[in-house]
Image (cartoon, rainbow, N blue to C red):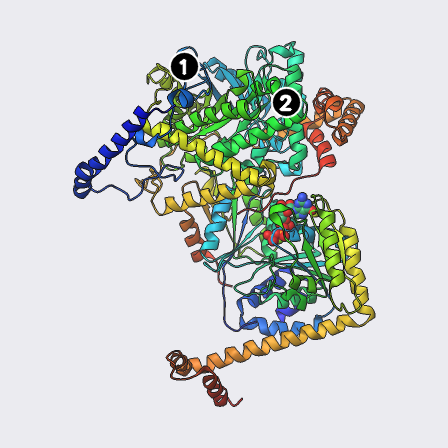
Amino acid sequence: MTTQVQQKIRVLIAKPGLDGHDRGAKVIARAFRDAGMEVIYTGLRQTPEMIASAAIQEDVDAIGLSCLSGAHMYLFPKVIELLRERGADDIVVFGGGTIPDEDIPKLKAAGIAQVFTPGATTGEAIEFVKSNIRSK
Amino acid sequence: MIDMHEKREIERIEKEKEQWEAETLKPALKSAPERAERFTSVSMAPVERLYTPADLPNWDFLKDLGFPGEYPYTRGLHPTMYRAKLWTMRMFAGYGTAVETNRRFKYLLEQGQMGLSTAFDLPTLMGYDSDHPFSAGEVGKCGVAIDSLADMEILFDGIPLGEVTTSMTITSPAAVLWAMYVAVCEKQGVPYHRIGGTIQNDILKEYIAQKEYIYPIEPSVRLVTDTVVFGAHHLPRWNTISISGYHIREAGATALQELAFTLADGMVYVEEAIKAGLDVDAFAPRLSFFFDCHNDLFEEVAKFRAARRLWARIMRERFGAKDPRSWLLRTHAQTAGVALTAQQPYNNIARVAIQALAGVLGGTQSLHTNAMDEAMALPTEEAATIALRTQQIIAHESGVTNTVDPLAGSYYVEALTNQMEEGAWEYFRRIEELGGMIRAIEKGFPQREIADAAYAYQQAVEREEKIIVGVNRFKEEDAQQIPLLSIDRAAEQRQIERLRELRRSRDKDLVMRSLDALRQAAAGKDPWGRDLLMPKILDAVRAYATQGEIMDVFREVWGEYTEPIII
Amino acid sequence: MELTRKILEGDVRAAARLMTMIENGASEARAALKSLYAHTGSGYIIGITGPPGSGKSTLTDHLTDELRKRRKTVGIVAVDPTSPFSGGAILADRIRMQRHSLDADVFIRSMATRGHLGGLARATNDVVDVMDAAGKEVILIETVGVGQDEVEVVGTAHTCVVVSVPGLGDEVQAIKAGVLEIGDVFVVNKADREGANRTATELEMMLHMAPDTGGWLPKVYKTVATKGEGIAKLVDAIFAHKAFLDERDLRKKKGRERSERAFMALLQETLRARTVERFKRNGSMKEMIERVADRELDPYTAVEEILDKIGL
Ligand SMILES: Nc1nc2c(ncn2[C@@H]2O[C@H](COP(=O)(O)OP(=O)(O)OP(=O)(O)O)[C@@H](O)[C@H]2O)c(=O)[nH]1
Ligand SMILES: [Mg+2]
């Protein structure tokens, strides 16, 4: 190992729920990579349990959840709940997808740090992650 | 044939154009430079300043355009097009349980809609029953939850299935849902030859784009082919595959990629059905298509025109189809969901109008217009009605339906149409080099092309090379609020309870026996001839086996698909 | 030490944290590794290497399945390349293995190469040690899709599994000589594809021609990773190799070699780092490099001068 410090931001991008629309998740994964981050991509149809567990093993700084099925009100808070149970609630969780405005305050109250709706840029997401992850 | 006269004419135009560039264009550019260095379509394809006959060098009116209702159908499938019959205005509906969707169906029929179109929820699309752990939070969300024939009976209660046609947006479990529909028709006393409608059933686009696959590609294609064979033998009015570019486009493909990959998928189904022993003309007339209509009006029109011309040529020349009905690319179209924005949602009404116009000018047979709120949720009744009215305005007020293929002869549109066709042939060549479409998908070729296009587009938006009104230009601070439809979680509980009740009350032995018979048929080596799967699925459905149970039988026998990782 | 204690007790979060510190070269990592060192050395390390897309991750997934059936606890380190342009990476091997993420006895960690060549990341060895100390009995390392020179895994693993696929037309992925030498067990995956038998036979012939193998005769196994076919036999073969090593005390020898390499690498890096640190403060090294660039000084003399100054 080296003594020179090489901090890299690690982000888990996951698609909870049953929908297969992974365009957004993939675009974000690429954009994060191009911004110099390490992106752990876990693919489609992940249960909240799988996501929380992977995030802890990978010791990520942030989790990005993408859901276009309408089940975000169940799935997103569940991930937060599981992280809390395992003492990993310092991981910043953000979400994206077809999410009605009225759900956003509820998701934020449940612990989702930010919600990106269609039209948000990858630049905004990158900026958000860079300025919101907690230093370890 | 291009004669000498025409050739000389083109040379003259080219010369004149050079002169125009020097004398008229150049000073104009100096005093008022163009807004951008490069102009591109929404697919990022370059667009020239001006199109002239010189852009159509080998173009032959009779060979490349011809007349509507005749080969190669560039100008449309029917000689009179919308002067005789408008397209079918078909709006997608489905949410919650069968009870709610049945109510919505009846409402839409009263509003003058001409056919039904069913959206299913994700557990149904993925072959899980509502009480499966993966279904938690998803039941009734994106569409209606259907677990068994009992739900299907409720869904179409009081709707005369001999008189309406029904389109079902379902793919992996298409055979099962179709069997349920047929079983409801049996109960209503509708004879097989009068049952009309469509199942989406295009499994290949799932591996490419929408990712609602379950089994490995080969057995999945076998299941699709089984339905084609069954339809050809028993249900002559049913469209057994709706070969879909829509999802490919929505996943980020360009218009050309949408066109090429969709037709490449279509060719696989034709080849498989021929391998299964059908004569090409026995099933090809029942293949239909489903394309996206995006914002770039002319590019979209060219895509539809090129699609018809390509398919006619492929079917006649490559597959030797003799029945002209086999040459026809009949298509449904839907406006682009990805083009809708959550910001300033009322703007979506204008977008949908332009997209719908593209579909109509492209000569579609049927059209769904998205509601303005679809970027955020399932449409409310009001929003869906505006979307339907948009089609009615195009049909009755705009005048575009008064003549056939009104954009024909536009140098731009014809040049685009040619480019589309040539580009598609080039893609077909590359796919063949990879060993055919199935191998190309296994290698991730179309997936990678699409992912690259999606990323390039997103970057162009972020650099503001592509302007999206209300998103990266003309933004507003105060967000417009529109009312949204919310689906109550109680629907999930109601559905699960009904399912439990069904499991208690049905004839368990009959269910087991029908599933065993299906298992044997699925495991059979020789898929064609005696052991067609559809009759076995029908038996299981009639016995009230649930769709999850039926799909699990195939899971057991065929295993599940893992996709190549393309990011 | 708190962190070490937690890791030894099997705390996943603590182990994962330490891995990050190791990757980032944080100074706390060094202290933790020091105190964990005594608890390492019992895990059996298996390297999985082969060309891109040959099915390494899918195999790793099914190997894990089989190992769990045999009641072994499993650690997985999956390495993917870092983009040389952005320094970022997409780590996607894990997708294939996600079904194990709820199993408390499986620990999966994805790593980016961060510019390190050789098929592994610089920190892979240390991360494997952490898994070892955390009690994982078998540790699987999936290398990046390799070419000829990326065979560093041989220095880390006890058994090296080399994966290839049927060579068909456009995708001839014949095993290169360098990779042939490092394999203890060979796999022709995607045996459901045409040409698998031929590829296996060709491989066997190449192996027969290989010089001195030290008593171990590598064999070729066919698998269909997606269906889990041939996996049990593959695990048997890996354990046969383990038995072979143990019988002749070769595992210890491999371990010693690995320790030596790790030691030398650490020495080299520490020396370099400390030297750079020392001379950075007064700027004299930068000046010296400039003189070398301007041909005023040759690099040999320059290095000697530096070493003289620190008394080496
Ligand atoms: N037909 C067939 N396909 C397989 C088999 N094993 C893996 N695949 C497929 O091959 C593709 C690549 O598999 P991976 O396991 O991701 O390969 P990899 O070697 O880990 O790939 P990289 O990490 O990207 O180098 C996937 O689509 C798998 O489903 C097999 O035995 N038969
Ligand atoms: Mg891999």
Q: Amino acid at mark 2?
A: Val
Q: Chain for mark 1?
A: B
Residue C272: horizontal and vertical position, in percent?
Answer: 52, 78
User: Mark 2 sits on what residue?
Assistant: B228
Q: Which residue position holds label 1?
A: B82
Task: Using the rendered view, name the quadrant where residue C140 is placed.
Answer: bottom right
**Whether residue B434 is situated above or below residue B229 in the rendered picture:** below
The percent coordinates of residue C180 (x first, y second) are 69, 61
Q: Are marks 2 and 1 on the same chain?
A: yes
Q: Left of B48 or right of it: where is B18?
A: left
Mark 2 residue crowding within 10 angstroms, few (<14) / some (14–19) / many (20+): many
- Could one spot residue B293 in this view of the protein? yes
Q: Is residue B390 left or right of residue B545?
A: left
For the point 43% across and 32% down, the residue is: B420
N-term mark: 2 or 1: 1
- Measured along the vertical axis of the image, is residue C80 above or below residue A102? below
Going by the numbered disc 1, the residue's amino acid type is Tyr
- Specify the quadrant that holds the N terminus of chain B: top left
Q: Position of residue B112 (x, y in %)?
A: 45, 14
Q: Is residue B537 above or below residue C26?
A: above
Q: Nearer the viewer, residue B467 or B285?
A: B285
Instruction: For mark 1, give the secondary structure.
Output: helix
Q: Is residue B370 visible?
A: no
